[in-house]
Image: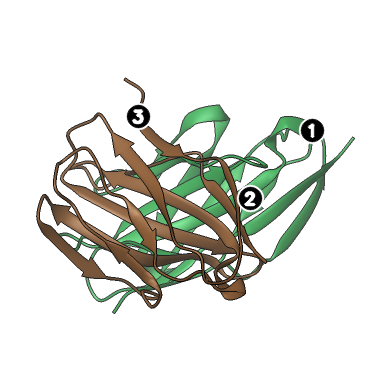
Amino acid sequence: NAGVTQTPKFQVLKTGQSMTLQCAQDMNHEYMSWYRQDPGMGLRLIHYSVGAGITDQGEVPNGYNVSRSTTEDFPLRLLSAAPSQTSVYFCASKSFTYEQYFGPGTRLTVT
Amino acid sequence: AQSVTQPDIHITVSEGASLELRCNYSYGATPYLFWYVQSPGQGLQLLLKYFSGDTLVQGIKGFEAEFKRSQSSFNLRKPSVHWSDAAEYFCAVGAMGSYIPTFGRGTSLIVHP
């Protein structure tokens, strides 16, 4: 099993550009989520999904879109990047026993 | 709503010394509790979890944690710290039927040789 994979590992965007962060898991988990991690702020939930076709907002959803067309994939879209979105982004999937499995992260810089 | 507090932002210990990282939670019923570790530049990895039963749980890498309902705490311990334990540690609380766990802000562990 590869677990949770994320691409790219690093990305630099200019303000106003859009991009998609990819996330995939091969554990057949129904629940997947996206977090951002900023110094001193811990992990903040952006969006989550409880299954294919079902998504919902987390704590900090503004400026981000998600969709879930398959169980395996849960991409995060930045519609118009802003410097405030400079962060490290983690995708996670959750087993039926409630423990979460995290991807290695994407470090995004918006200039 | 559930919440998690990790009172210590940074903890510094000498290699070989014992370690205790504090975690306090707020939740009305019996929570599911977790500790995760994040090494520099990596994602989070589950160290251990508590759902029910024995209040002292063993995890990977020699860590253990004790659930104390009366104190609403789930402190992480290790009897002898190794330099490779230097990392960020996150406590998290979940609830049966809830898809959304709540994470603490993390404690950064620094290990001196």
Label 3, residues with CA under 10 Å away: few <14, some 14-19, many ≥20: some
Q: Which residue is mark 3?
A: A3
Q: Residue A56: x and y, percent? A: 21, 68
Q: Which residue is mark 2?
A: B88
Q: Are marks 1 and 2 on the same chain?
A: yes
- The subunit letter for the residue under badge 1 reads B
Q: Is residue A105 visible?
A: yes
Residue at figure coordinates x 46%, y 71% from the top left = A80
Could you tell me how far apart the alpha carbons at marks 3 and 2 are, in whole angstroms?
21 Å
The colour chain A appears in is brown
The colour chain B appears in is green
- The subunit letter for the residue under badge 2 reads B
Instruction: Determine whether the residue tagged by mark 1 lies in a helix, strand or loop.
Output: loop
Residue A108 left/right relative to A70: right
Could you tell me how far apart the alpha carbons at marks 1 and 2 are, in whole angstroms?
18 Å
Nearer to us of marks 3 and 2 is: 3
